[in-house]
Image (cartoon, rainbow, N blue to C red):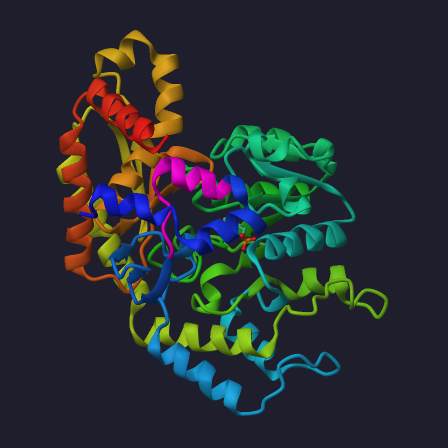
Amino acid sequence: LIPAAELESYRLHPALAQYARHVNPAFVELLNVLGYGRLYQRALDVWVWDHRGNRYLDCLAGFGTVNLGHNHPRLVSRLESFLKSEALNHFHVGPSPYMAEVAARLARDGLEMALFCSSGAEAVEAGMKLAQAATRRNKLVYCSGGYHGTSLGTLGVMGDPRKRDAFGLPNGRNIEVPFGDIAALREALSRRDAAGFVVEPIQGEGGVRLPPAGYLEQAQALCRRYGTLLVLDEVQTGIGRTGSLFAFEKDGFVPDVLALAKALGGGIATIGVALTGRALHRKAYGSMDRFDWHSSTFGGNSLSCVAAIETLRILEEENLVANAAARGAELIEGLRKRLSGHPFVKDIRGRGLLVGIEIGPTDATWLGRAAPAAVSLVSRKLFGHWVSLKLLERGIVCQPAALRWDVLKVEPPLTIRQEEIALFVDAVADIFAEYCDLPSLLGDAAKRLARLA
Ligand SMILES: Cc1ncc(COP(=O)(O)O)c(C=O)c1O
C-alpha cells in the first residue's frame, strides 16, 4: 500500500504541471482530485513503474493496446534490427512489401484486402467510407453505448450523447439502435438507405456488454438482405483479446469490413487497418479514378508494419490467444466466486481477457430500493473510479469503461500468469470486503475528497 503522505507528493511532479500547462489542464486536475496523479516511467510485460519506483500490475494495457505485454523483448529487438538495417520507412511511390505481408497475414476468406491507417478511429472511418463508396448510400446505423473513436467522422456513430452532441455532425442522417436489439436493427435497415451498420462484437468502452447469442450473425443476414455493409469494429476486441484472434471467429459469420488497430502494433507502433472483401474493394476503389480515395501518409509505414508482423508471430508462437482464453476464464470464475452476492456487485461478465465488473447497489440494498434514481446517479459517477483508486493504492492499474464509469474494465496484457490473476482477484475481493454498505463507501469517499480538496 502506498502511504497517503507519499501520494500527495505525486501531485507536485514538474512533468504533471507542464502537462497541465500545455496539454490538458482539466485531465490533470481530475486525476489529482481523484487521487490518480502520478507519473509512470517504465514498463515491462505486465508491470509498470512510477517515478518513485513503485511497481503496478497493469490491468488496463493501454485500453487493450499492450496485448503482448510492455516492451516485449522479441518485438523490441526486431524493431531495433529494422531501424539499423537502412530499410525504407516512408516512401510512397511504390508498393510496400511490409504492407503486403501484414495484409496477407491478416487475410481471411471474405477479408482479403487491406486499407492501412494509424489509429482505431481511422480504421473505423475507413470502413464507413468504404461502405459509402461501395453502396452509394451515405447513412450509417450504429448502437447506443458504442465507442468508435473521437474523430469527427466516428463521432457521427458515437453511442454516447455526452461525447457526441457538442459537435455539428452529419449524424442527423445516422440512426442509433439499441445494442443487441435485432428488431430495432431490422426496422432501421429495412428503409434500404443505410450504407453501413457499425458495431463492436462486445462493447468495450460501453461497459463490456455482450450481445445476445446469435445477434451478430442475424445482423449480418439483415445487412445482406437490405444492401448494407456490416462494419465490425474489433479495434479493442481484436488481436487475441477475447480468446480468439478476432472475436467474430466465435460468432459464425464474416463481417463485410473488419476494423483493427491498437494491439496490432504490439503496444509500441501505431497502426490501423480495415479489411474487406475483393468485390467490395473493387466496387469502392477499384478504378483508376478511385484508387487513391483512401490514402494516409503514415498509414502502413514500414516500421509499424514490421511491428505488426512480429506481433502476429509472437502471439502465435507464444500461444497468447489461448492464454487469454484460459486466464480470462480463471479471472471471471475467481471474481464470481469471491464477489457473487455482494450488495454492490451487479454483474461480472466478459470473454477472454476483456472483463467487466458492474458496480452499484443491487435491489438487495435498502438504498437501492428506497432511492433508486439518486443511488444510480451516484454509482454511475463514483463507484468505478473509487474501486480503481483503491486498486491503484494496492499497486494495480485498472479503470472504468470510458462510457460507463460504473463498470470496472479489466483487460491486462495477454501474457498475464495465474498468480497475477489471483493477485488481482484477491485485491478486488479485499476492497469489496471493506464496503458492504453504501454509507461506509460514501463516508470514505467524502473523507478522501475533502482531504484532497
Ligand atoms: C472499439 C473501439 N473502436 C475505436 C476506438 C478508437 O481508437 P483510437 O483511439 O485509436 O482512435 C477505440 C478506442 O478505445 C475502441 O475501443
Q: Main secondary structure of the magenta part?
A: helix
Q: Residue at x 38, y 61 (%)?
A: 240
Q: Residue at x 58, y 40 (%)?
A: 222
Q: Is residue 445 above or below residue 352?
A: above
The magenta stretch spans residue 36: yes
Query: Which residue is at the front of the view, 65 or 440?
Result: 440
Query: Which residue is at the front of the view, 131 or 222?
Result: 131
Regarding residue 25, the answer to whether it shows in the image is: yes
Q: Horizontal and vertical percent for residue 113?
A: 62, 68
Q: Residue at x 54, y 75 (%)?
A: 305
Query: Which range of residues does the magenta coloring cover?
Result: 27-39
Name which quarter of the figure residue 367 lies in.
Answer: top left
Q: Is residue 266 above or below residue 91?
A: above
Name which quarter of the figure residue 244 lies in.
Answer: bottom left
Q: Horizontal and vertical percent for residue 320?
A: 31, 67
The magenta stretch spans residue 122: no
